[in-house]
Image (cartoon, rainbow, N blue to C red):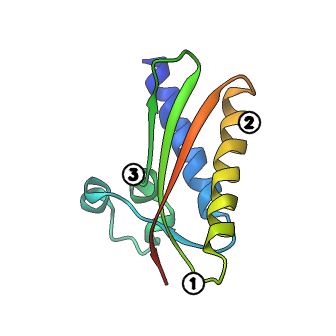
Amino acid sequence: MAVDKELGELTEHIAEAVAGVPGVAFLRPGLAGLLRASPSGKGMLSGRGARSAVRITRTRTPRSLAIEVSVVLRSSPRALDLTRAVRAAVLETVRTQLGPDVQARVTINVTGLI
């Protein structure tokens, strides 16, 4: 159970870090997150909606994770740079929360530009 709690907290930290990257419009939650999201007016940058846009799974290799983040970016001539900044924010969060010896394979899905 401690592992599940650790991954849940990591998911929240990653969602916060990604939302703070300049150029990220919002995290795109999956269907389950949309159904659970409250209509509080906070948008998709907070709450369960944002956390459902971050999926973390443990791989077969010890101390290794696969992380998938779905985001919508603000229109920019260099969306690739924004994607790289999101990936860097995810990796820095993993290092900060779990230590430098954890390996992470990070996939960023850009689901739209606004």
Q: Residues within 10 Å of mark 2 (few under 14, many from 20)?
A: few
From what the image shows, is residue 56 above or below residue 32? above
Mark 3 vs 1, N-terminal side: 3
Image point (54%, 37%), residue name: 9
Q: What secondary structure is marked by label 2?
A: helix
Residue 64 drawn at (x, y percent): 56, 25
Q: Nearer the viewer, residue 17 or 79?
A: 79
Q: What secondary structure is marked by label 3?
A: loop
Q: What secondary structure is marked by label 1?
A: loop
Mark 3 vs 2, N-terminal side: 3
Residue 34 drawn at (x, y percent): 29, 62
Quadrant in which the N terminus appears: top left
- Looking at the rendered image, the disc whose residue lies closer to the viewer, 1 or 2, is 1
Image point (63%, 28%), residue name: 103
Farthest residue to the top: give it.
Answer: 62
Q: Which mark is residue 75?
A: 1
Left or right? Give the position of 73 relative to 85. Answer: left
Q: How far is mark 3 from mark 1, CA to CA? A: 23 Å
Name the amino acid type tagged 1: Ser
Q: How far is mark 3 from mark 2, CA to CA? A: 21 Å
Left or right? Give the position of 75 relative to 35. Answer: right
Q: Which mark is residue 52?
A: 3
Name the amino acid type tagged 2: Thr
Q: To which residue does mark 2 refer?
A: 96
Q: How far is mark 1 from mark 2, CA to CA? A: 30 Å
Name the amino acid type tagged 3: Ser
Image point (39%, 70%), residue name: 40
